[in-house]
Image: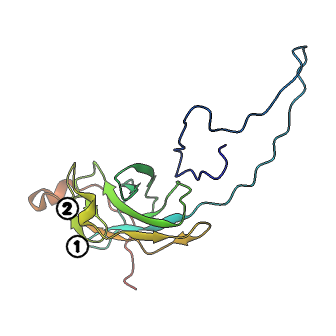
Amino acid sequence: MYPDVLCQGTLCPSPVGVGVLVAVTGGVLPFVPVTVDMDLSAGGRISGTVADAGSSAAVVGANVQVYSLTGQSLGSATTDGLGNYISSAGLTTGQFYVRTSNALGYIDELYDNVVCGFSCQLSLGTDVGVTTGAVTSGVDFGLSWAAPSLARSRPAAGPRRSAT
Protein backbone atom coordinates (compact mmCIF):
# COMPACT_ATOMS: atom_id res chain seq x y z
CA MET A 1 0.00 0.00 0.00
CA TYR A 2 2.87 2.35 0.77
CA PRO A 3 6.19 2.29 -1.02
CA ASP A 4 9.00 1.08 1.23
CA VAL A 5 6.78 1.07 4.35
CA LEU A 6 6.47 -2.23 6.19
CA CYS A 7 3.28 -2.98 8.08
CA GLN A 8 3.35 -4.83 11.41
CA GLY A 9 0.47 -7.24 11.93
CA THR A 10 -2.70 -5.53 10.75
CA LEU A 11 -1.40 -2.03 11.45
CA CYS A 12 -0.07 0.20 8.70
CA PRO A 13 0.78 3.88 8.94
CA SER A 14 -1.74 6.01 7.09
CA PRO A 15 -0.39 9.52 6.56
CA VAL A 16 -2.35 11.42 3.93
CA GLY A 17 -0.59 11.67 0.59
CA VAL A 18 1.97 8.92 1.17
CA GLY A 19 0.26 6.10 -0.72
CA VAL A 20 0.64 5.27 -4.40
CA LEU A 21 -2.23 6.64 -6.46
CA VAL A 22 -3.93 4.11 -8.72
CA ALA A 23 -5.85 5.89 -11.48
CA VAL A 24 -9.20 4.37 -12.39
CA THR A 25 -10.92 5.74 -15.46
CA GLY A 26 -14.42 5.16 -16.63
CA GLY A 27 -17.56 6.03 -14.81
CA VAL A 28 -19.80 3.94 -17.00
CA LEU A 29 -21.35 0.77 -15.66
CA PRO A 30 -20.14 -1.92 -15.61
CA PHE A 31 -16.81 -0.74 -14.24
CA VAL A 32 -13.75 -2.46 -15.60
CA PRO A 33 -11.61 -3.85 -12.76
CA VAL A 34 -8.11 -2.48 -12.46
CA THR A 35 -5.32 -4.95 -11.70
CA VAL A 36 -2.65 -3.78 -9.30
CA ASP A 37 0.27 -6.12 -8.65
CA MET A 38 2.15 -6.01 -5.35
CA ASP A 39 5.05 -8.02 -4.03
CA LEU A 40 4.21 -9.21 -0.53
CA SER A 41 6.60 -10.99 1.78
CA ALA A 42 5.30 -13.57 4.20
CA GLY A 43 5.57 -12.14 7.68
CA GLY A 44 7.22 -13.87 10.58
CA ARG A 45 5.26 -15.65 13.30
CA ILE A 46 5.74 -16.82 16.87
CA SER A 47 4.61 -20.23 18.14
CA GLY A 48 4.73 -22.27 21.31
CA THR A 49 2.63 -23.98 23.95
CA VAL A 50 0.82 -22.94 27.10
CA ALA A 51 0.70 -25.58 29.83
CA ASP A 52 -0.26 -25.88 33.48
CA ALA A 53 2.98 -25.38 35.44
CA GLY A 54 2.05 -28.04 38.01
CA SER A 55 0.66 -30.83 35.85
CA SER A 56 2.04 -30.04 32.37
CA ALA A 57 -1.53 -30.36 31.05
CA ALA A 58 -2.37 -28.20 28.06
CA VAL A 59 -4.09 -24.90 28.85
CA VAL A 60 -6.86 -24.75 26.25
CA GLY A 61 -8.34 -21.39 25.22
CA ALA A 62 -5.62 -19.09 26.60
CA ASN A 63 -4.87 -15.95 24.62
CA VAL A 64 -1.27 -15.17 23.65
CA GLN A 65 -0.52 -11.59 22.61
CA VAL A 66 2.40 -10.13 20.63
CA TYR A 67 3.66 -6.57 21.22
CA SER A 68 6.26 -4.33 19.62
CA LEU A 69 9.11 -3.12 21.83
CA THR A 70 7.17 0.16 22.15
CA GLY A 71 4.13 -1.66 23.54
CA GLN A 72 1.91 -1.63 20.43
CA SER A 73 -0.33 -4.70 20.18
CA LEU A 74 0.45 -6.50 16.92
CA GLY A 75 -1.70 -9.59 17.08
CA SER A 76 -2.78 -12.54 19.14
CA ALA A 77 -3.55 -16.24 19.04
CA THR A 78 -5.65 -18.66 21.09
CA THR A 79 -4.31 -22.01 22.27
CA ASP A 80 -5.84 -25.10 20.70
CA GLY A 81 -6.82 -28.42 22.31
CA LEU A 82 -3.15 -29.31 22.84
CA GLY A 83 -2.17 -25.91 24.25
CA ASN A 84 -0.40 -24.92 21.01
CA TYR A 85 -0.58 -21.45 19.48
CA ILE A 86 0.85 -19.62 16.48
CA SER A 87 0.60 -15.87 16.13
CA SER A 88 -1.59 -14.45 13.42
CA ALA A 89 0.44 -11.30 12.94
CA GLY A 90 2.70 -11.01 9.91
CA LEU A 91 5.77 -9.71 11.71
CA THR A 92 8.84 -8.06 10.19
CA THR A 93 12.34 -9.03 11.27
CA GLY A 94 12.85 -7.70 14.78
CA GLN A 95 12.28 -8.19 18.49
CA PHE A 96 8.87 -8.58 20.16
CA TYR A 97 7.33 -9.16 23.58
CA VAL A 98 4.87 -12.01 24.11
CA ARG A 99 2.43 -12.48 26.99
CA THR A 100 -0.57 -14.57 27.98
CA SER A 101 -4.05 -13.37 28.85
CA ASN A 102 -6.72 -15.70 30.13
CA ALA A 103 -9.96 -15.89 32.07
CA LEU A 104 -9.41 -19.54 33.02
CA GLY A 105 -8.03 -19.02 36.52
CA TYR A 106 -4.32 -19.04 35.67
CA ILE A 107 -1.79 -16.33 36.52
CA ASP A 108 -0.72 -14.65 33.28
CA GLU A 109 2.92 -14.39 32.29
CA LEU A 110 5.17 -12.31 30.14
CA TYR A 111 7.76 -14.40 28.27
CA ASP A 112 10.04 -15.75 29.84
CA ASN A 113 8.42 -16.68 33.18
CA VAL A 114 7.57 -13.16 34.45
CA VAL A 115 4.24 -12.84 36.32
CA CYS A 116 2.10 -10.33 34.46
CA GLY A 117 -1.26 -9.14 35.78
CA PHE A 118 -3.84 -7.10 33.89
CA SER A 119 -1.22 -4.48 33.10
CA CYS A 120 2.51 -5.11 33.29
CA GLN A 121 5.72 -3.51 32.14
CA LEU A 122 6.57 -5.35 28.93
CA SER A 123 10.25 -4.46 29.13
CA LEU A 124 10.57 -6.77 32.16
CA GLY A 125 10.10 -9.71 29.81
CA THR A 126 12.55 -11.38 27.45
CA ASP A 127 12.12 -10.15 23.90
CA VAL A 128 11.65 -12.73 21.16
CA GLY A 129 13.54 -12.48 17.88
CA VAL A 130 11.58 -12.98 14.67
CA THR A 131 12.72 -13.21 11.05
CA THR A 132 10.37 -12.25 8.23
CA GLY A 133 9.06 -15.38 6.53
CA ALA A 134 10.00 -17.72 9.40
CA VAL A 135 8.31 -19.09 12.51
CA THR A 136 10.09 -18.57 15.83
CA SER A 137 9.06 -21.63 17.85
CA GLY A 138 9.53 -22.66 21.45
CA VAL A 139 8.05 -19.55 23.04
CA ASP A 140 6.38 -21.62 25.76
CA PHE A 141 4.54 -20.71 28.94
CA GLY A 142 3.96 -22.70 32.13
CA LEU A 143 1.10 -20.99 33.96
CA SER A 144 0.36 -21.43 37.65
CA TRP A 145 -3.15 -21.80 38.94
CA ALA A 146 -4.23 -18.59 40.69
CA ALA A 147 -6.11 -20.20 43.58
CA PRO A 148 -4.61 -23.53 44.72
CA SER A 149 -7.33 -23.88 47.37
CA LEU A 150 -9.93 -23.95 44.59
CA ALA A 151 -8.26 -26.74 42.63
CA ARG A 152 -11.54 -28.68 42.49
CA SER A 153 -13.05 -25.89 40.36
CA ARG A 154 -10.14 -25.87 37.94
CA PRO A 155 -11.24 -26.04 34.28
CA ALA A 156 -11.02 -29.40 32.59
CA ALA A 157 -7.41 -29.80 31.55
CA GLY A 158 -6.33 -30.67 28.06
CA PRO A 159 -4.02 -33.57 27.36
CA ARG A 160 -0.81 -33.80 29.36
CA ARG A 161 2.29 -32.67 27.54
CA SER A 162 5.39 -34.80 27.75
CA ALA A 163 8.54 -33.08 28.95
CA THR A 164 11.12 -32.74 26.20
Q: Earlier in the sequence, mark 2 or mark 1?
A: 1
Report the residue marked by disc 1.
54
Which residue appears farthest toward the front when viewing the image?
17
Q: Whole-percent x and y of residue 103?
A: 27, 48
Q: Is 164 left, or right, of 23 in this rendering?
A: left
Is residue 27 shown above or below 72? Answer: above
Q: Few, some or many C-alpha atoms within 10 Å of disc 1 (few <14, some 14-19, many ≥20)?
A: few
**Is 38 in front, or is 76?**
38
Q: Residue 79, percent across and down?
A: 43, 58
Q: Secondary structure at mark 2?
A: loop
Residue 37 % position (x, y): 81, 47
Callout 2–callout 1 Cβ contact below 8 Å: yes
In the displayed structure image, the side of residue 114 where residue 89 appears, left or right: right
Dot 2 amino acid type: Trp
Residue 127 picture quarter: bottom left
Q: How is the image coloured?
A: rainbow
Q: CA distance from mark 2 to mark 1?
A: 8 Å
Q: Say which residue appears at 48% left-offset and 66% top-offset.
A: 94
Point out the image quarter for the C terminus.
bottom left
Q: Is residue 106 left or right of residue 47?
A: left
Q: Is residue 128 above or below residue 34?
A: below
**Residue, x 34% and y 52% (percent of image)?**
71
Number of marks in picture: 2
Identify the secondary structure beneath mark 1.
Answer: loop
Q: For the view shown, which residue lies furthest in the top direction?
A: 28
**Residue 122 appears in which quarter of the rendering?**
bottom left
What residue appears at the point 53 percent right and 63 percent down from the top-left corner?
45
Report the residue marked by disc 2: 145
Relative to the observer, which residue lies in front, 109 or 53?
109
How crowded is the residue under tag 2: few (<14 C-alpha within 10 Å), some, or many (20+)?
some
Q: Given the image, on which type of amino acid does mark 1 rest?
A: Gly
